[in-house]
Image: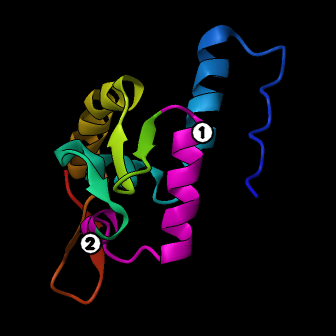
Amino acid sequence: MTKQLSSASPELPPPVEALTHAFALLGRRWSGLVLAALAKGPAGFGEVRERVPGISDRMLADRLHELAAAGLLTRTPQRSSYALTSHGDAFLIPLAALAVWAEEHLMVTPTGTGGTSRRG
C-alpha cells in the first residue's frame, strides 16, 4: 500500500506548487538514485539493486512502484524489467544539474584534523 502525496495548498503560486509536488515524490529517499540507475537503460530488479548500493529490497520495490505510478518508469511484465518513460527520461537533465550543484556546494572533504569542511 502506498501513501497518497498530499496536495499543495491552494494559496501557493504555480511554480511553488509544482516544486511541492516534485519534491514530495522525488525528494523521497532513494527516488533520484533509482531513476539515475535506469538512465543506463532498462534493468531488472536485481540490476537496479546493484546500481543503487545500500537500498533494501523492500525499499526498492516501494520506490519502483511509486515511480511507476507517477508515470516516470514502466515495468515490462515478461522480463520484470524497468525502464524510464519520456517523463522519467526528462528528469535526467535536472538530476544531472543537481549532481553538479551537490558536488560543488555540498560535498564534504576531510580536513586532516578528524573533522570535515565544505569545499568552496
Callout 2–callout 1 Cβ contact below 8 Å: no
Secondary structure, mark 2, is helix
Above-or-below relation of 103 to 97:
below
Residue 116 figure quarter: bottom left
What kind of residue is marked 1? Ala
| Dominant SS type (magenta) | helix
| Residue reaching furthest to the right | 10
- Residue appearing at x 50%, y 53% in the figure: 64
The reply to whether residue 28 is visible in this rendering is: no
Start and end of the magenta stretch?
47-71
Above-or-below relation of 17 to 106:
above
Tell me residue 114's x, y (percent): 26, 89
Tell me residue 99's x, y (percent): 26, 45
Q: Which mark is residue 69?
A: 1
Secondary structure, mark 1, is helix
Apparent side of residue 31 relative to residue 84 in the rendered image (left or right): right
Instruction: Out of 84 and 79, give the one closest to the viewer.
Output: 79
- Residue appearing at x 43%, y 46% in the figure: 75
What kind of residue is marked 2? Glu
In the picture of the structure, the residue carrying the numbered disc 2 is 50
Image quadrant where one finds the N terminus: bottom right
Instruction: Out of 63 and 26, give the one closest to the viewer.
Output: 63
Instruction: Out of 2 and 7, give the one closest to the viewer.
Output: 2
Who comes first in sequence, dot 2 or dot 1? 2
Dot 1: few (<14), some (14–19), or many (≥20) neighbours within 10 Å?
Answer: few
Tell me residue 80's x, y (percent): 39, 57
Apparent side of residue 17 relative to residue 48 in the rendered image (left or right): right
Assess whether residue 110 is covered by the magenta stretch: no
| Residue reaching furthest to the top | 14
